[in-house]
Amino acid sequence: MQCLSTALQEHHGTRRLPGCHRNPNPTHPLRYTRITPRPPRGPAHARLIGNTDYDWYRFLAAQPDVDEVNFWQPSGGGGRVGAVSPGEPFFFRLKSPHNAIAGFGYFASYSALPAWLAWESFGRTNGAADFDEMRARIERYRRRSGAADSGRPGDYAIGCIMVASPVFFPQEL
């Protein structure tokens, strides 16, 4: 990426910005080129990407006027979501074979709840038409990971990451 601001500053007699280096090509119109972008700094630039189920995405993308979703974690999430503050971007990444960012929203909160209570609290914003459908998906992932079965349907903790103002990208992208 060319460092146009540095070239303009140099033209006007001011010093170049940090991170920009002299272009080895003397005939190039811009004598300074940014070699690598500087990484974002500070907690306001933290990002979280959650791997998600395609059916969760497809169901919620078809819902009109969804203002908040429950991005559930079948294992309970370990009781935390890293160093994320409310309002920070949260990206939805589809699992294989799709392997694509399917949308985003803004982290609101995290809590670990029994699956039945998550359904009672958030309903269809769990990404399923009913509790049985949600439970079947959760239990499929729990079996794959070897999580213990409580013996009673939906009586196990899941991580509930509340994501506000979700945006779902069209499948065509």
Image (cartoon, rainbow, N blue to C red):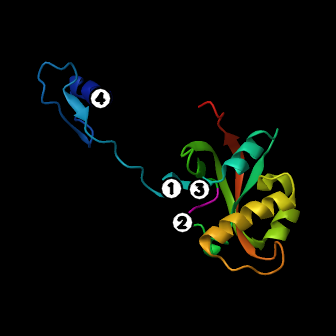
**Residue 53 visible somewhere in the drawing:** yes
Which residue is drawn at the image coordinates 70% and 64% (left, top)?
A: 140
Q: Is residue 10 magenta?
A: no
Label 4 sits on residue: 2
What residue type is disc 4 on?
Gln
Label 3 sits on residue: 50
Gap between marks 2 and 3 measured at Cα = 14 Å
Gap between marks 3 and 4 measured at Cα = 33 Å
Label 2 sits on residue: 83
Which residue is drawn at the image coordinates 64% and 75% (left, top)?
A: 79
Give the mark, 2 or 1, whose residue is nearer the N terminus.
Answer: 1
Mark 1 surroundings within 10 Å by alpha-carbon count, few (fewer than 14), some (14 through 19), many (20 or more): some
**In contact (CB < 8 Å): disc 2 and disc 1:** yes
Gap between marks 1 and 3 measured at Cα = 13 Å
What residue type is disc 1 on?
Ala
Label 1 sits on residue: 46
Left or right: 131 in relation to 72: right
What secondary structure is marked by label 2?
A: loop
Q: What's the magenta region?
A: 82-86
